[in-house]
Amino acid sequence: MSQKAGLYQEHTNIPKADLPIVGNWDSANTTIGAGVAIFHLASSRVVLCYHSTNNYYFLPKGRRDASEDTGSGAEREGFEESGYRNRLLPLPIPTRQPKAHNPSPSSAATTPFVTEPVWTQLVPVTRTAQYILFWYIAETVPPDLEVSLSAQEKEQGMAYQYPPKFNPEMTLRERMEVEREGYEPVRHENTGVDAEEALYESYLMPVEEAIEKLGRGISADVVRKGWEAIQLKHKMEDGR
């Protein structure tokens, strides 16, 4: 098993938040990563990656680039490892982060929905280096955005293009109506950045099936928490 694959394998214990700890790592000994569960809202499916050599399912994740926003890094890693364009989805996620003190009326901060990580993991890379991994929830991008981002990439020499943020004034039901019935999100080929990622396959599958294939670790709970938050947002927007 490669070092990268070994690092990303996780214990299959029932997920439970650990007690708070104190730790200090300077920049030379800190690696920040981000992962993402990418949902296709209209079909109630989620993207899973599959390692074709080591034979296990996982959610896309990886190190953010230097100077890159962590949430944007999650979107980019999601695209590179799975081939599906995605953007973070504002959801009713429990968080200890405060709202902006004086947001503009059009700001996403005026809604009860946020794009915060649903899980955070600390993984030792070496005896002195610490890996900090944030797990986000995202959606596949709508058809018009898929087309425009693909065109921009061709114009920019195939450099990855970050998607615009989800419109905070749009409901999930309105978002789903943007797609024609039966629309299938585009899966791009050869988006991996190294030989290891060339071994990855990816699939859109029903949420419950994905949770079963991921086992009892954090990744399964990322999918579970994301789907529960999506269902709760539907109810909140419908006034229930």
Image: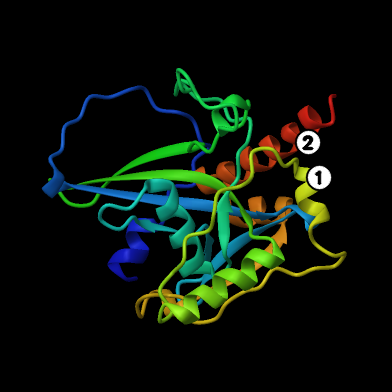
| 1 vs 2, front mark | 1
Question: Above or below — where is 169 with respect to 95?
Answer: below
Mark 1 vs 2: CB contact within 8 A? yes
Q: Is residue 142 left or right of residue 201?
A: right
User: Percent from the top left, x then y, of residue 216?
Assistant: 56, 45
Mark before the other along the chain sequence, 1 or 2: 1
* Picture quadrant where residue 111 is located: top right
Q: What element carries label 2?
A: helix
Q: In this view, does 217 lie to the left or right of 234?
A: left
- What's the image's color scheme? rainbow
Between 206 and 193, the one lying in front of the other is: 193
Image quadrant holding the C terminus, namely: top right
Instruction: Check residue 234 in the rendering and tell me which mark sits there, or answer none.
Output: 2
Q: Is residue 101 left or right of residue 87?
A: left
Question: Above or below — where is 124 with respect to 75?
Answer: above
Q: Residue at x 45, y 28 (%)?
A: 17
Amino acid carrying label 2: it is His
Q: Residue at x 67, y 35 (%)?
A: 229
Question: Above or below — where is 233 with respect to 160?
Answer: above
User: Percent from the top left, x then y, of residue 28?
Assistant: 12, 49
Between 130 and 103, the one lying in front of the other is: 103
User: Percent from the top left, x then y, of residue 221?
Assistant: 57, 41
Instruction: Check residue 173 in the rendering and tell me which mark sits there, or answer none.
Output: 1
Q: Residue at x 30, y 58 (%)?
A: 65
Mark 1: few, some, or many residues within 10 Å (few <14, many ≥20)? few
User: Percent from the top left, x then y, of residue 217?
Assistant: 51, 45
